[in-house]
Amino acid sequence: MSNIIYLDNAATTRISSTVREVMEPYLDNLYGNASSLYSLGRESARAIHKARMDIAEALNCDPCEIYFTSGGSESNNWAVKSAAALAAKSGKKHIISSEFEHHAVLHVLQALEKQGFEVTYLPVYENGIVRVSDLEKAFRPDTGFCTLMHVNNEIGTIQPVSDIGALCKAHGILFHSDAVQALGSVKFDISVLNADLLSLSGHKIHAPKGIGALCVNNKIRLPPYIVGGAQESGLRAGTENVAGIVGFAKAVQEAVSGTEAKNSKLLPLKEKLCKEIMKLEKVHLNGDPEQRVVTNLNFSFEGIEGESLLLMLDMAGICCSSGSACTSGSLDPSHVLLALGLPHEIAHGSLRISMSQYTTEAEIDKLLEVLPGIINKLRIMSPLWERIKNQCSIQKK
Amino acid sequence: MLYSEKVMEHFANPHNVGEIENADGIGEVGNEKCGDIMKMYLKINAGIIEDVKFKTFGCGAAIATSSIATDMIKGKSVEEALKLSNKAVVEALEGLPPAKIHCSVLAEQAVKTAIADYYTKQGIDPLPIVGEIPEHCHGDCGND
């Protein structure tokens, strides 16, 4: 698998060698339970404490505001369910969110709607960015909290979370942000994000899968999420994933300190990809061309279907993803692309390219070398493409 | 999702791709909203399918089922081709993931629709011979 060109870093990332190195002792002889009294246990407790301190320093928050979880989905579930419970206590059953949240938020909201909550889903428009003015209009006397992602996982658009958080603060309501895709790709400082609750994930930033965090503002008392132990201040029971926590801390430090260098390295690659791919016929860039993370590009190719495209890229040794129905596991294409107002058939033909610090220009060149041929091959056998071409020639006449 | 080697073989190098000029029967099923369209062209001589071509917009399974279904009816009589079932297509491909079974249904429908078109062009009512062909793209799609 050594020749694989991995351009699906929004799905997951490789573990960095430095992360692996700091984890190793805890996968080897330092296996103590952090709750145990003897030195082997204390060593694990110390490692967790240090990890919490390191993360707090990197993100500019208080160490006691960090709760380790199994990752982004758990953090989102915990945050949204808890925020709803807190809001309901004061009789507030209205929630504000957006149309294109991750399913780990969206599905929780849908469950809450069945329990009597009302949710306003802010539109994200053609460019995939919510408008602060829409949020302003959405506030009601019974609004309990707002949950909006920082960076969209499919199209990479950056949301104005800082302004949204400030507005929520002014209205005295809780604000949660799913920042899983933002960490390591945008400048990250919790103190300016104005988020009371923030979801983070390890495996998107070169830590292993199964570790993440929920950052909780000191002023908020969350109800316990998993009971049965004193871990994480009694809010999230379960023997800690020590190696994961240690690796996650290292990855957070590297992600925060390396954001600028990564972005300046990848900017020319992003521009090259964009320029060359946009030269192809009937192709669209999904999401705002400027207000997006450097690592993500999402295109739609008319007349072809995403899964076929991914399979052909895979045969050329390139890993990407698509929002087509066939790859989403449902019969509808991605809710994110539909939220942009794309017709189904254009959403079916989408391709997400997501880079990491390890992406090289040679890899991008290889993608650019094979992609036009693949698009052409699929279009030649597509009756939809034939129709699109015929419509074009009718219009020209 | 795991495709069989046979599916990948037909997807990577699909047989019978293209169009037939002045085809004796053309059948198109599916729609772009659902993400798959299959179009089949038949050349029929003395009741025998002499040539068949297809064009498909869709996933790997849609392309593979089109390829193998066209292989399976080529050189056969129209009556035999009408007996092609989606089950036979799945078997010939050494299985399909459950979510992709609808592609084999689509392939069966494409063949039947093309044959119905052939009968219509001959001035013969296809309904008693071919039977009803459901108009929706596939039974489990909520987009109709």
Image (cartoon, coloured by chain):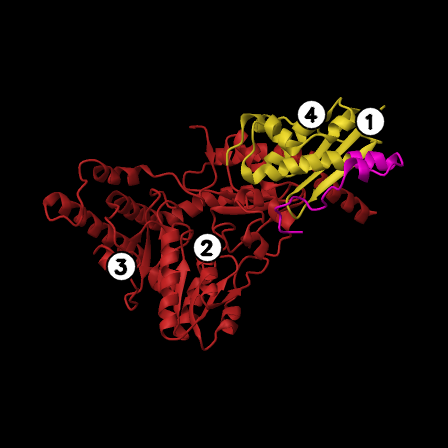
- Residue B118's quadrant in the figure? top right
Pinpoint residue A384: horizontal percent, then vertical percent. Answer: 71, 42
Chain letter, colour yellow in render: B
Q: Chain of mark 4?
A: B
The answer to whether tags 1 and 4 share a subunit is: yes
Confirm whether the magenta stretch covers residue B116. Answer: yes
Under circle 2, the secondary element is loop
Q: Are marks 3 and 2 in contact (CB under 8 Å)?
A: no
Q: Earlier in the sequence, mark 1 or mark 4?
A: 1
For the residue marked with disc 1, what is the amino acid? Ile
Separation of residues labelled 1 and 2 (CA atoms): 56 Å
Q: Which residue is mark 1?
A: B44
Instruction: Look at discs 3 and 2 and give the one toward the viewer.
Output: 3
Pinpoint residue A140: horizontal percent, then vertical percent. Answer: 48, 75
Q: Which residue is mark 4?
A: B72
Q: Which residue is mark 3?
A: A235
Chain letter, colour red in render: A
Q: Are marks 1 and 4 in contact (CB under 8 Å)?
A: no
Pinpoint residue A370: horizontal percent, then vertical percent. Answer: 58, 32
From the viewer's side, name the closer residue of B81 and A325: B81
For the residue marked with disc 3, what is the amino acid? Leu
- In the image, the segment drawn in magenta is B115-144
From the viewer's side, name the closer residue of A397 and B129: B129
The answer to whether tags 2 and 4 share a subunit is: no
Q: Write the residue at 57% across / 25% down.
A: B6
The residue furthest front is B128
Under circle 1, the secondary element is strand
For the residue marked with disc 2, what is the amino acid? Val
Separation of residues labelled 3 and 1 (CA atoms): 72 Å
